[in-house]
Image (cartoon, rainbow, N blue to C red):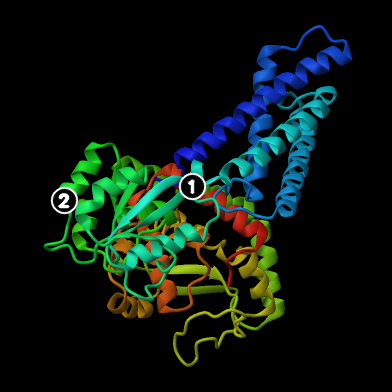
Amino acid sequence: MRQFSLRTITFFLIELSLFVAGGLLSVYSGIYWLGSDSYDLQLFVSHIISFAVFYHFSLFYFDLYDIKTRVPFSVYSLRLVQATGLQCLFLAFFSYFLPRLVFPSPYIYYILLVDFLLIFGWRVFYDWLTRHDRFNELIMIVGNSPVAGKICEGISGRKNSGYQIVGIMGELKEGRNGCDGCKLLSPDYSKLYSIALAENVNRIIVSMGQRRGLFPAAELLRCKMAGIIVMEDVDFYEQLEGKILVDNLRPSWLIFTPGFRKPRQTRMFKRSIGMILAGAALLLAAPVMMLVALAIKIDSPGPVFFVQERLGEDEKSFLLFKFRSMCTDAEKDGPVWATEDDDRVTRVGNFLRKTRLDEIPQLINIFKGDMSFVGPRPERKYFVDQLKKEIPFYDQRFSVKPGVTGWAQVRFPYGASVEDAKEKLQYELYYIKYLSPVFDLLIILETIKVVLFGRGSR
């Protein structure tokens, strides 16, 4: 999984070190000002770990680890204050129920203040640091395929991507989308090596639509031997955007690219954890389900549950369970795509969709083994037959079990067209390529954030 770049990992480790340093400074300051003799080291370790976990969760849920996106300073400061407020709620809760897990009250005031100032100062410094282009990785694009335009758009659309395009080798076609603002270094590929050295390039992205008779193998090999990273455009785009570009994707790339492994241990782990968590969640959610069922019956006539045939792993059909969120005659004229502000959705259904409460009965599907917690969304055969004709590699999404949530769900809004389905497939293929329990955990955490803030529902 490439969700954690070297820059992100370094950022996180520095911030974690500041947390620990702030904790030590706060404790020793507290000892001095409170007149205490010592502070138990073992207790300090457990306290600082719990404090760091709570604070990092708070920062995560206010998008403060989305370091590739630069937001206005006022917004950024407000989010940091909100994250600190959420941290205080966590500390108050655990201070009451598990007091040994958190710092005692005399010290907690010190550590909250010191860590807030350290983190705020560090992030202001990091923001200043990343505004200077000399800290960006210098990239040269070789070729002018449509993927090159998408890469240019992806980098220029982020103010803190960590990359800077020095220019493009090859002939730029007029009006090419995304590449218009990029500098043309030379149309002559024989000068590739000398130009790469002159521009201090760190990475070369090969994006040649037509390679026969044009591919500068010798020049690229010289660059590779000189220590410059050489990548295919599809690989770099995947790393940049967190999705696999299906347009013009060669089957050979899917065959030979690393990943797309599904070890038996991973599949068994997902299945066993899914059964245990789904069973426990059904018991805990029973009171909520009763209230939702009552609200549905009061709001509109019809059944409480919505049962529909969907396609799962290997395109095997199963019955999907959801709370009904639409009127009973929603598809009297046949299947149609969901739309924003869909007038077929009931008042209670609108609330259920925004809070994702309509998905709770899918725990039954997870317990039965039809679905997993994380995976591509299960689709109806009517739409699958249509999409397989229009979207390349669409049938590859059925190589894993469908999920209640997934990488596409947290990165892209609810699909309402063929183009949306293609966009979601690109995220789904990325998920299948890097399938792992750690990736599943990240998606679940992102899903909780989506539910809390009501994003992406339709």
**Residue highlighted by disc 2:** 217
Labels 2, 1: front one: 2
SS type, badge 1:
loop
Residue closest to the eye, 59 or 44: 59
Identified at 23% across, 52% down, the residue is 191
Identified at 58% across, 74% down, the residue is 324
Can you tell which mark lies on residue 162?
1
SS type, badge 2:
helix
How far is mark 2 from mark 1, CA to CA?
27 Å
- Identify the amino acid type marked 2: Ala
Residue closest to the eye, 103 or 156: 156
Residue at the outermost bottom position: 333
Residue 192 appears at what percent x and percent y?
Answer: 25, 51
| Vertical comparison of 388 with 166: above or below | below
On screen, residue 50 versus residue 376, left or right, reads right
Identified at 78% across, 43% down, the residue is 85
- Identify the amino acid type marked 1: Gly
